């Protein structure tokens, strides 16, 4: 029987091309349950979801002209967790499966190659995996609700589509980005990722963000930008400083009606130039709030989608062999992919689950790996009144995390800190 | 339990703040289970061992075949020396770095040039030529200096790449003239048959890069026009 296969969606095209020998774009979603994970029940749950979420059980294959995803008949790798999240997913592993499941104590984690889906899709898959796992473990019934779908029906075609193609404008918007300040530090030689998690009260965070005149994302971006500006000022004289911007992914499902479980998000760079003068948190929150509102419109996003979609339709590019496309996409990524921001602040928002699951799920986390050329990254998710800010880095210095979380405390948002740095060899 | 410096709340039982490393003198409560286990992935090593093993085997087989063929046919190495030398040179340049987890260009670039110099010496001696000292050694030596210098500058200096590439192109332009000069004194090839073209082209490109680096408005205009 022939296997199903999928073309990579528009956002996913870049990720195979920009992989490196020790880096590829992977993210993690995880949940802490009330009791330790039972690997056998977990295995059953993972197998049971194969029919409902076929686009997650795939391998990355290289065609003559494009990469593509092919449904995998191999079982998904389920194993004990490592000393740090988001260990390197090499070419051989991607040819076996683009997703891995890890467990440690009460925690269940899904790590996924970004060509398969985005953070929203990953979190949705995790929530359904937990629902299936809890049903099998406790013989309870978990109805659909929140991110949990009806798992008795097969995947709909709308869940497997490339929604970018549907919402592309006829004309591409011009994108030019100034180079942002680049964070750097002493690289960890063995690939270790330091993860520092700040746990905050969601109500307090929302209230503080509103007090400063913005949403949670714009407030956290403002705090982060101010910290990076200070960090830059401590290293570089004012005249040679660069603009400080953070990259904020925008979930396009909020702007366009789409049920896709594949990638459907775009990034915006927001920030300011420190050479124009000092900025308070109020200033920055207001500026970033306005920048996000001005850019995250249906019209602007359609134009940006078009700038990614239209090149795919150029006949000469379509018939170029995949290795040539790799070179071009890699050059484009170097030129415009990461240079516009210092780090990502990816906020999945508040996750809701059906009532029946709440007694069994204590916590949810969302972690994105460091980008190819910048060492820090930050991801945020809220669940059951708590906000979890995961800051990851592949360098030794924890100066940015220290400044960021201390600043939140100074602004009246108490933070509880967890870290895996003790596991570093 | 709170860090006295950062003000953040810490997990019970930790001995120091993970943000500022300030020691916690009175860790109260029982230490919670570590959020991550001790296991490291087995593949964090960056060396390409399977590739290195396969290529080493391949080189060994080809070398043995050449050796056996030459000894059977001629009773001596004959042309096999060039073949085996070429394979050794390929091995040093392409296969040797695969054995290492961290490939340091500042070491491997000079090592590769040294291998090339030895191979050239073998060819020179075997063919009875007298061009090694007057041509091969200086050309390989200067190439080694230029490429190692470029690599180190790119690796250790974070800014000013446009100046580095500009300077490199101008030096490369001068190098092509030197190559023609060494060809002239070693083999009697007439001077300035082709090096003037490379000299003018590369120098112009190098000077242009330096100008772009020196004049920010020009750089911005080029960025704007050639943005893709």
Image: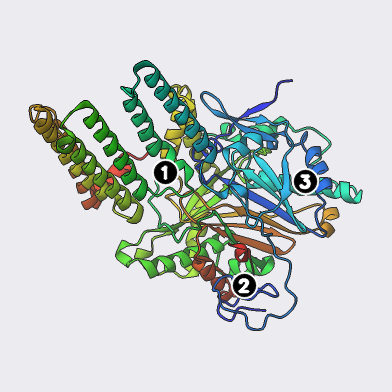
What chain does badge 1 belong to? A
Task: Residue A46: give x, y in percent of width and height.
Answer: 78, 41
Q: CA distance from mark 3 to mark 2?
A: 33 Å
* Residue located beneath label 2 in the image: A413
**Of all residues shown, which one is farthest toward the right?**
A139
Q: Quadrant of residue A173?
A: top left
Q: How is the image coloured?
A: rainbow
1 or 3: tag closer to the N-terminus: 3
* Residue located beneath label 1 in the image: A334
* Same chain assignment for discs 1 and 2: yes
* Residue located beneath label 3 in the image: A129
Q: Quadrant of residue B37?
A: bottom right
Task: Residue B57: give x, y in percent of width and height.
Answer: 50, 31
For this view, does A122 lie left or right of residue A150? left
Closest to the observer, A309 or B64: B64
The answer to whether the residues at label 3 and label 2 have Cβ atoms under 8 Å apart is: no
Q: Secondary structure under badge 3?
A: helix
The quadrant of the rendering that contains the N terminus of chain A is top right
The answer to whether the residues at label 1 and label 2 have Cβ atoms under 8 Å apart is: no
Task: Residue B224: give x, y in percent of width and height.
Answer: 32, 43
* Same chain assignment for discs 1 and 3: yes
Q: Secondary structure under badge 2?
A: loop
Q: CA distance from mark 1 to mark 2?
A: 37 Å
Task: Residue A251: give x, y in percent of width and height.
Answer: 60, 46
Q: Can you say whether A30 is above or below A48 in the image? A: below
Q: Can you say whether A425 is above or below A96 in the image? A: below
Residue in the picture at 45% in, 53% down: A341
Residue in the picture at 8% in, 30% down: B191
What chain does badge 2 belong to? A
Q: Residues within 10 Å of mark 1 (few under 14, many from 20)?
A: some
């Amino acid at each position: 029987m022939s296997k199903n296969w999928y073309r990579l969606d528009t956002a996913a095209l870049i990720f195979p091309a920009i992989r490196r020998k020790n880096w590829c774009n992977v993210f993690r979603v995880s949940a802490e349950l009330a009791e330790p994970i039972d690997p056998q029940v977990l295995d059953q749950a993972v197998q049971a979801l194969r029919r409902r979420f076929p686009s997650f059980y795939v391998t990355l294959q290289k065609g003559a002209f494009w990469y593509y995803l092919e449904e995998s008949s191999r079982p998904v790798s389920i194993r004990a967790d490592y000393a740090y999240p988001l260990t390197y997913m090499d070419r051989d592993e991607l040819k076996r499966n683009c997703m891995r499941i890890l467990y440690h104590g009460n925690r269940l984690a899904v790590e996924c190659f970004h060509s398969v889906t985005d953070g929203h899709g990953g979190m949705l898959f995790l929530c359904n995996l937990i629902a299936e796992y809890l049903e099998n473990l406790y013989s309870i019934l978990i109805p659909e609700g929140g991110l949990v779908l009806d798992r008795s029906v097969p995947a709909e075609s709308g869940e497997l589509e490339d929604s970018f193609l549907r919402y592309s404008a006829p004309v591409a918007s011009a994108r030019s980005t100034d180079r942002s300040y680049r964070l750097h530090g002493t690289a960890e030689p063995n690939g270790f990722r330091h993860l520092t998690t700040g746990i905050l009260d969601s109500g307090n965070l929302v209230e503080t963000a509103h007090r400063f005149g913005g949403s949670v994302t714009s407030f956290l971006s403002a705090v982060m930008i101010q910290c990076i500006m200070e960090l830059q000022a401590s290293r570089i004289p004012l005249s040679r400083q660069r603009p400080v911007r953070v990259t904020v992914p925008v979930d396009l499902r909020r702007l366009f009606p789409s049920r896709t479980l594949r990638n459907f998000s775009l990034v915006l760079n927001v920030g300011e130039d420190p050479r124009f003068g000092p900025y308070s948190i109020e200033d920055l929150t207001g500026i970033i709030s306005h920048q996000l509102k001005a850019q995250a419109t249906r019209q602007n996003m359609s134009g940006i989608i078009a700038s990614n979609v239209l090149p795919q339709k150029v006949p000469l590019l379509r018939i170029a062999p995949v290795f040539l496309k790799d070179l071009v996409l890699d050059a484009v990524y170097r030129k415009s992919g990461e240079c516009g921001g210092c780090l990502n602040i990816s906020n999945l928002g508040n996750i809701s689950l059906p009532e029946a699951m709440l007694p069994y799920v204590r916590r949810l986390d969302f972690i994105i790996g460091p980008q190819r050329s910048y060492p820090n990254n930050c991801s945020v998710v809220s669940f059951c009144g708590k906000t979890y800010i995961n800051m990851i880095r592949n360098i030794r210095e924890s100066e940015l995390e220290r400044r960021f979380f201390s600043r939140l405390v100074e602004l009246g948002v108490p933070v509880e800190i967890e870290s895996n740095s003790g596991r570093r060899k | 339990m709170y860090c006295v410096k950062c003000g953040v709340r810490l997990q019970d039982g930790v001995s120091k703040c993970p943000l500022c490393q300030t020691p916690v003198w009175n860790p109260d409560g029982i230490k919670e289970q570590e959020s991550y286990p001790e296991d490291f992935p087995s593949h964090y090593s960056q060396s390409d061992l399977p590739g290195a093993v396969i290529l080493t085997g391949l080189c060994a087989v080809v070398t043995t075949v050449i050796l056996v063929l030459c000894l059977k046919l001629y009773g001596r190495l004959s042309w096999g020396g060039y073949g085996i030398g070429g394979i050794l040179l390929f091995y040093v340049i392409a296969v040797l770095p695969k054995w290492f987890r961290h490939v340091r260009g500042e070491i491997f670039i000079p090592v590769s040039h040294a291998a090339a110099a030895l191979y050239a010496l073998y060819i020179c001696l075997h063919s009875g030529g007298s061009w090694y000292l007057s041509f091969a050694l200086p050309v390989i030596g200067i190439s080694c200096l230029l490429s190692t210098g470029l690599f180190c500058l790119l690796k250790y200096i974070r800014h000013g790449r446009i100046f580095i590439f500009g300077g490199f192109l101008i030096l490369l332009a001068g190098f092509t003239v030197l190559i023609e000069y060494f060809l002239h004194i070693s083999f009697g090839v007439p001077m300035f048959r082709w090096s003037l073209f490379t000299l003018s082209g590369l120098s112009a490109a190098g000077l242009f890069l330096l100008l772009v680096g020196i004049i920010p408005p020009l750089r911005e205009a080029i960025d704007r026009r050639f943005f893709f």
